[in-house]
Image (cartoon, rainbow, N blue to C red):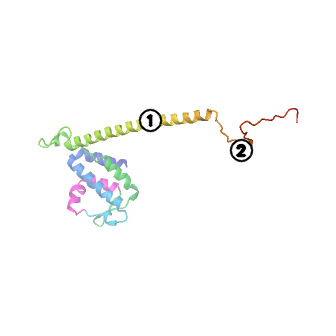
Amino acid sequence: KELLKECLISLTETEDSKVVREAIENLLTIHRNIFHNEDNSKYRLLKPTNPSFSRKIWSLYICRQFMLLSGWIEVHGRIVFNSDENLLEVIELLLQFRDVAPSASEWDTTTKHEGKSEAQLREEDLKRKAVLEREKEIAEYEKDKKYRDELAKNIKAQIESDRRKPKQVFTKPVAGNQLKKGAKIKTLQGGH
C-alpha cells in the first residue's frame, strides 16, 4: 500500500494537475467497475492499444507502475486484473488523491475565479436555511415536550391528591330497617 501511495505522490509532483486528475479519475473508474461488476470479466481486461486508455493512463510511467503494483499483469498484449484482495484498498487510496488542486502556474486568468461560485453560495444558503428550520423544529418540539411534561406532572399530582382524600361511602338503607313516621324505637335493656 505504501508503494501505491508513493506512486500517486510522485504522480502529483511530476505531472500537472489536469493530467493527474484525469489519470486518477480514470483509474478510479476502472477499479470501481471491477468492484461493482465482480463477475463480469470484461472490466478486468484492458487493451493498452485503446487510444483513450493509452493517452490518459498507460503512457504515464507512474500510472503504469501503479497499476502493476495494484494487481494488474500483462498477458499476451493485454492488461489483466487478478488481485481482488487489494481492490478496496486501491479504491480508497485513489479517493484520497482525487482532489488535486491546480498549481498557481496552471491557472488561466480568463477562467480564474476566486471566492465561491453561485452554486456553492446557493448550496450554503440552502444548508443555512435547513439548519434554521431544524433549529425551529427542535425549539417547537422542546416547547411541546415541556408542556406535555408539565401536564403529566399536574395529572399525577391530582391523582395522588385524590388518593389521599377520605372516600365517602354512600349506602342505601335496607328496606326492613326503615322506621315509619311516629314509630317507637324499642331498645333492649338488661338483656331482655
Q: Majority secondary structure of the magenta segment?
A: helix
Determine whether, in the image, residue 181 is placed left or right of residue 4: right
Q: Amino acid at mark 1?
A: Tyr
- Give the residue displayed 32% in from the left and 46% down from the top: 96
**Which picture quadrant has residue 50?**
bottom left
Mark earlier in primary sequence (1, 2): 1
- Quadrant where the C terminus sits is top right
Up/down of 22 relative to 187, above or below: below
Label at residue 175: 2
- State which region is magenta: 48-70
Tell which of 113 and 86 is nearer to you: 113
Up/down of 27 relative to 110, above or below: below
Residue 67: percent from the left, percent from the top? 31, 56
| Label 1 crowd (10 A; few <14 / some 14-19 / many >=20) | few
Residue 151: percent from the left, percent from the top? 48, 36
Tell which of 76 and 89 is nearer to you: 89
Determine whether, in the image, residue 172 is placed left or right of residue 2: right
* Residue occupying the far left of the picture: 110
The answer to whether residue 64 shows anywhere in this view is: no
At numbered mark 1, what does the secondary structure look like: helix, strand or loop?
A: helix
- Give the residue displayed 20% in from the left and 61% down from the top: 51
Q: Which residue is mark 1?
A: 147
Q: Tell me the mark number nearer the camera, choosing from 1 and 2.
A: 2
Tell which of 169 and 178 is nearer to you: 178
